[in-house]
Amino acid sequence: MEINELLKQNSKFIKDFVSNIEFEQYPYYINQFSLSEKKSIQNIGISMSKKLDKLEKEKLRIQDMYEYEKNIKISDNINNVLCLDEVGRGPLAGPVVVCGVMLEKNPNILYVNDSKKLSEEKRKDIYSQIIKKNIQYKTEILDNNIIDELNIFNATYKAMSNVAYNFGKHIEHILIDGNQIIKDINIDQTAIIKGDSKILGIALASIIAKVTRDEMMIEYDKIYPQYHFSKNKGYGTKEHIDALKKYGPCPIHRQSFLKNII
């Protein structure tokens, strides 16, 4: 629609129109709306300008999250940095899931953060973008039986070691969320506390692991509906503990986690 025709429309029509345009077109319409004599149209332009400012700030935040990894690549003259994170250390039931992500460059996926800070809808949206952009990743899933056999700490780092092994010999540095490195791997490693909030690749790994595990727990809920796994994801909510006391554990419960509960 020509701008002159658009400016003749009412505010609701214009708002609906601009809600369907790309952000790249915003500057043109912001400028045109600022020239209007109608206060309502000027306000639409002001609102668009604020949205554009927020978008630019978010792009900068994502750039900052990639900066640490980028600097390692430059300073060490390397290309292949593996970012690792896990989901599922604390639940009473279900697996621990580890994901490793290797970025060639900043994929420019916005609103990435520690998976725990994101809504389920946002995690799924980011996950779909990861798939569309063909980002390299691998997951390792260790079930409750292995967790009981090894303990959760050893199981988690076994899964991390397996992910690194599955990526092959071309890994040159590993960034890990937390304060521990993988002891049985002879590769340069850096453990970063709260890395899933600071490092882009680790945050992406966190999201992939979370989406993967949540989907598994939703499927388990269909088999063991009395524990409400689709809702609690295996964590020790009151509802979950009450079900444990009533029905006892099911085959995916971690026996080593239940000693003081039932």
Image (tube, rainbow, N blue to C red):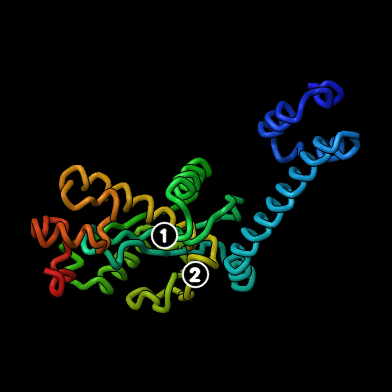
Q: Is residue 156 above or below residue 129?
A: below
Q: Residue at x 71, y 40 (%)?
A: 23
Give amino acid for label 2: Gly
Task: Tell me the CA gap for discs 1 and 2.
Answer: 13 Å
Q: Position of residue 237 (x, y in %)?
A: 26, 62
The residue sitting at 48% across, 74% down in the picture is 192
The residue identified by callout 2 is: 195
- Find residue 100 and name its label: 1
Which residue is at the front of the view, 181 or 80? 181
Measuring from the top left, give residue 225's x and y in whole percent.
18, 46
Disc 1 and disc 2 in contact, CB within 8 angstroms: no
Q: Residue furthest left?
A: 247
Please state the horizontal and vertical placement of residue 85, each as a whole percent of the image. 41, 64
102 lies left or right of 214: right
Q: Residue at x 27, y 46 (%)?
A: 218
- Vertical placement of 88 versus 135: above or below? below
